[in-house]
Amino acid sequence: MTSLQARLLVGLIAALTVLSLLVVAIGGYTLRQVAENFVASRLEHDLETLLAALEFDATGQPRLPADRIDTSFHKPYSGHYYQIETPGGELCSRSLWDTDLVLPPLVADRFTRTFIAGPQNQQLLLVGRAFRVEDQPVMIAVTEDFTPIRQGLQHLLLEFIGIALLLFCALLWFQRWIVRRGLAPLEEVRRELPRLAYGEIPRLSFDAPDEVRPLVVELNRLLVLLDQRQRRSRHALGNLAHALKTPLTALIQIVEQPSPPDHSNGWKELRQQIRRIHALTERELKRARIAGGGAPGRRVLLEREIADLVETLRRIYRHRDLRFEIDIPPGSSFPGDRDDLLELLGNLLDNACQWATSTVRLTAGAGDAAYLRYRDTPSGVSPMAVPGTPGTVYTADGLEHTERGIPSSQSRDHQRQLDKRLRKLQQHDYGARWADVEGDAELAVITFGSTSAAVREAVARAAAQGTALRLVVLRLLAPLSQGAFDAALAGVREVLVVEQNHGGQLLRYLRSRVDLPGRAKGYHRPGPLPLRPGELARVMTEWARAHAAEEALA
């Protein structure tokens, strides 16, 4: 399947199908549960009514006054049944006729709810419970036929499925419309390609989605390069034709003139014009050999292209035994056209080969090679030029980049810069400013951020009441220096982490990064009201007393 539209539609159909099936399944289950809970609540009420009406005669036989029993329990096989079992006997509703229900085990602490088979293949929902009435164990079960409700639910579920199918078709049509509308710019690009082939338009329009725009930009760049190459070819042919026109005209005149007695001057001029034609054609052929047959629009890698160029020049000037010294940084590239670069370097090196005595030296570079804005240093700290520094460019961008600051989407550049930043954070010496550590008590309170002032005042109040606490106010959370943190908590037996949020995030973070002494506890409360010193002092005092009590018991 190569059609992007077909792939999207198939994916959408699969997603909508799964969603519709889930909705139908969950909807059907939910409706059944709602109906079952409704019927069960009604049966619980009937059971409690029977329990309130139950009496025992002098012989211990159970009985129910007829005026306190609902009429639905009198109609045979009505689906509404009850059955009461006691040590003195059993009571069944008249609606059961001569049938006895097989009751499941009933308990006294909760209602038992289950489905059982009833008379005439009825599916009964049973609710029962065990009681003690007048110091006698009693088990009461009440049932209702769930078959009509189940049939109604099935009918309702079929209607729901029908509505879901209609909605599914409507959503499918709507999604197809959205896909076709979203791919409309691609269709416009497809329509422009034949016009571009026939020369009706010079290039593709840039009105394309972000995902396709880079492809359109590269195609347009390739078209521009092809156009430039074609123009250069025409100009070269025109120049060659004009250059050959003069010597050819001279040759024609020499041939048409009568032969003089002395042919030496004529043959001398003829040889001169032929040499000129040979030099012109040799120059163009040399340029063609140097340019080669590279693919148009390809990015120019200097190291490879110059190596091929030097090899060609070695063969051309092999009689001179020249030595070439090439200094090109690995991975260097030229952002322009390949033919322009090779023509420029070819002429330059060709002149160098003609006039050099023994060595031809070529060095490539871009500006100040010593300055790399995002240099991958061992410390992770890269140089940053002050704006206006000669030979440098001040760079401040938000995209991932190479060491020179050129935006890059290559994974190796991204990984390299991430590793550099991590080294910078891990190796930097933060000194004593990573946290404020106050006191040397065995109980420590840890906090950070905007709660620091309230916690510091609460620690002071607790100290005034005789509870000594050590305070650690974190400034640097990541990376957390384990060595400095362990030194700050040296001698601490237990810590209390105070923070203002819902989930105790700081406590969870510290537990994941370091080993907290004792049984670390946390006190956290969300806003919007800030933590108050009095509230915190009370919490700290109670926490310290609880710790002292546990120490005393130990």
Image: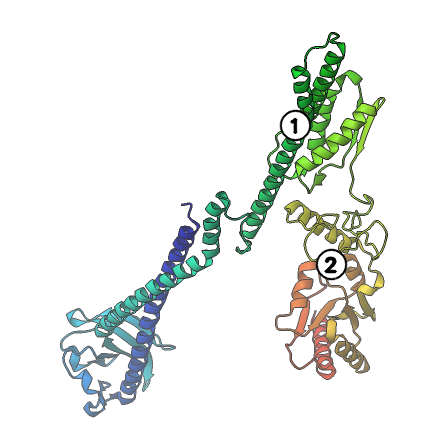
* Residue 511 placement: quadrant: bottom right
* Residue 234 placement: quadrant: top right
Foreground label between 2 and 1: 1
Instruction: Kindly identify the amino acid type of the residue bearing the numbered disc 1.
Output: Ala
Quarter of the picture holding the C terminus: bottom right
In this rendering, position of residue 191 left or right of residue 20: right
Q: Give whichever of discs 2 and 1 has the lower sequence position.
A: 1
In the rendered view, would you say 339 is above or below 211? above
In the rendered view, would you say 75 is above or below 402? below
Residue for badge 1: 288
**Are circles 2 and 1 on residues that touch, CB within 8 Å?**
no
Q: Position of residue 520 (x, y in %)?
A: 68, 67
- Helix, strand or loop at disc 1? helix
Question: Could you tell me if residue 316 is visible in this image?
Answer: yes
- Give 277 or 77, whichever is nearer the viewer: 277
Q: Position of residue 301 (x, y in %)?
A: 68, 36
The mark tally for this picture is 2
Quarter of the picture holding the N terminus: top left
Instruction: Kindly identify the amino acid type of the residue bearing the numbered disc 2.
Output: Pro
In this rendering, position of residue 292 left or right of residue 19: right
Residue for badge 2: 479
Question: Could you tell me if residue 106 is visible in this image?
Answer: no
- Give 101 or 307, whichever is nearer the viewer: 307
- Give 151 or 126, whichever is nearer the viewer: 151
Q: Position of residue 75 (x, y in %)?
A: 15, 82
In the rendered view, would you say 230 is above or below 57? above
Q: Position of residue 330 (x, y in %)?
A: 73, 36
Furthest residue in direction bottom, as rendered: 67
Furthest residue in direction top, as rendered: 261
Q: Mark 2 Cα within 10 Å, few/some/many (few <14, many 20+)?
A: few
Distance between the alpha carbons at the discs numbered 2 and 1 = 60 Å
- Helix, strand or loop at disc 2? loop
